[in-house]
Image (tube, grey):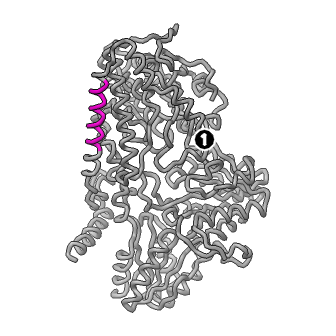
Amino acid sequence: MEELTIIGAINKGLRRAMDADPKVLLMGEDIGKLGGVFRATEGLQKDFGENRVIDTPLAESGIVGTAIGLALYGYRPVVEIQFDGFVYPAFDQIVVQVARMRYRTAGVLHLPITIRMPYGGGIGSVEHHGESPEAYFASTPGLRVITCADPSDAYWMIQQAIASDDPVIFLEPKRRYWQKGQVDTNGDMSTAVPMNGAKVLVEGADCTLICYGPTVATALQAASMAAEEGVHLEVINLRSLSPLDLATLNTSVMKTGRAIVVHEASSSGGIGGEVGQCLMQSCFYHLKAPVLRVTGYDTPYPPSRNENRYLPDADRILDAVEKSMSY
Amino acid sequence: MNQLEPLIQLLDNDGSIVENSQYKSSLDDATLLGFYRDMVLVRQLDMQATALQRQGELSLWAPCLGQEAAQIGSGRALKAQDFAFATYREHGIAWCRGVDPVQMLRFWRGTVHQSWDANKHRLYGYQIIIGAHALHATGYAMGAQYAGNVATGQADKDQAVIAYFGDGAMSEGDINEAFIFAAAYQAPVVFFCQNNQWAISEPTKRQSRVPLSHRADGFGMPGVRVDGNDVIACHEVTMAALERARSGQGPTLIEAVTYRMGAHTTSDDPTKYRNSADDELWRTRDPIERLRVYLTGKGVLNETISAEIAGEATSLAERMREGCRQFPTPEPLAMFDHVYAGPDARIEAQRAEMQAILAQEGAN
């Protein structure tokens, strides 16, 4: 076991994936000498060379588009998009090309590309540095969309993403980058929890709190506050936003009869709506209250001085718990 | 970037006038002294803002240190009726467009998304997305054409648009598409690229094998390479390009070769990727120092005037420190304003939800 931050775990996970498979190469802006603006790739260019850790021109569409070509040649590109808000120039290449290549070619061509990006707010930065674009990708067939919330998941899930033969959008909760935790860096990927599975982090009988990425820590905080009041929340980290691990969600909600989905992204058209719909379909007769959402508001991300009002906090979660419990 | 490639220079590193067959200085002493004052004050505002970030008053700042000549020289070439589209580093352009430096800080303090009224100053807000605004500038220029505000021959009517961006932006699709549109429609737009040698950690050679101005040829517009630390040359080259645009002769790409003397932003640490020898070399090409030497030699600048400007700089810094701390955090409910033209049921429900939370907090 080793104590790592989330960003440190991603760095180690990338290194291990590169050691394991010479076809793995990294591409992105400032990922070489600088090691990335968050230092996810620190030291990797020095050890693996400029042909495997590639500083690219400033062109996000170009980065993803050329990653497609490299993948067609047999490489396994891991692309870094520097910030969530910078991904949109590459949106066309991701949703129109990356996502559909296997389907379009009836399986003749496939693109084992991992697209990493820091996402979410809470770091006090300027516009385009606090966005949660996951719903765009989760609603695109052909992409797998996953997100980590602790160093151990960060370490294993990045390796699983790279090993996947499907394209993966790997979302990194940037305000949690420096959160520490124990990681079994001597372990084996085959025994790690699969990247498409949800995890029950806390068991509880009263209400299921469904969260992912940056809101996991907030949900855990809310759960311990609720426990002091005698309300026992079951906290589930979704981990995979597409596909959803419905089996784990159904088991929990059939037990508790109540569910609240928490995410930073806006509510409309978001993951919460999808989860709620799935639960209504599979757990309708078990539900004691409507599935509720605690999310960012349906506004663009606000100036940072007020971002903590925008981001779901433990109080807003507990208000929803109370609403659900008293329904 | 090969510094030996020809570039337009009218004032050299030592502060001496250089003859050029194509361009010559049209500036009188008073105007040049004004440029000097501009550059000193912009450097002061930049350094003060950097300090305010270090003190925790701003969440971020993107310094324009070293790029004062490119910005003041070109910014002072704009007429009132022109419109400028700039990035997060163009504090000198904001200065030329009459934005109070105290107001500039609001964005960086995280209280607003845009620091000033774009229509009032005829300057778009700081653009964060690399290159996106070059297309907006081109469309705006096409609007000026369609509205009949180009090539009328009336000096106070004909409009030009200028778009500022850096060497890194030259790789973005949006920039290249802007060049295509501007050339196709002969739009009255000037593309002003400050090649400051670094796109965060990546040197210009990562973006281009040829001088950036050479790209213009392939798009069908003139490309001009100018010493970006020479305020006189930057001014003359931009004046000519803007006039060309206003008179209906179409777009120009200007590459102003300069150097980002500071970090990319206050979050960046350039020691990780570039060596101090480059910093030292460019310090000898300082844009302010060479004008100081020239104006002093001519007797235009003396100790009294220098002291006056220094005094102005000191009070500007003081005003920024005080003003910055006085910007209030906006009312949280303000985040629900301006999402749509009119009220929206979802937004209003969420506004009410937050109102209830605030009321509850107030009661506790």
Image quarter hosting the N terminus of chain A:
bottom right
Q: Nearer the viewer, residue A2 or A141?
A: A2
Residue A168 in picture, x, y percent from top left: 64, 62
Image quarter hosting the C terminus of chain A:
bottom left
The residue that appears at 58% across and 67% down in the rendered structure is A6
The span shown in magenta is: B306-320
SS type, badge 1: loop
Residue B179 in picture, x, y percent from top left: 53, 29
Query: Which secondary structure is most common in the magenta stretch?
Result: helix
Q: Is residue B83 left or right of residue A95?
A: left
Q: Residue A74, relative to residue B189: is it above or below?
A: below
Q: How many marks?
A: 1
Mark 1 crowd level (few <14, some 14–19, many ≥20, 10 Å Cα): some
Q: Which residue is mark 1?
A: B274
Residue B180 in view in this figure: no
The residue that appears at 27% across and 32% down in the rendered structure is B312
Q: Residue A154, relative to residue A26: is it above or below?
A: below
Q: Amino acid at mark 1?
A: Arg
Residue A102 in picture, x, y percent from top left: 71, 58
Q: Nearer the viewer, residue A35 or B239?
A: A35
Q: Is residue A29 left or right of residue A132?
A: right
Q: Residue B258, relative to residue A145: is it above or below?
A: above
Quadrant for residue B117, please give it. top left
Q: Is residue A113 left or right of residue B46?
A: right
The residue that appears at 66% across and 70% down in the rendered structure is A156
Residue A67 in picture, x, y percent from top left: 69, 50
Q: Nearer the viewer, residue A227 or A135?
A: A227
Residue found at the far front of this picture: B303
Give me the chain letter of mark 1.
Answer: B
| Magenta stretch holds residue A194 | no
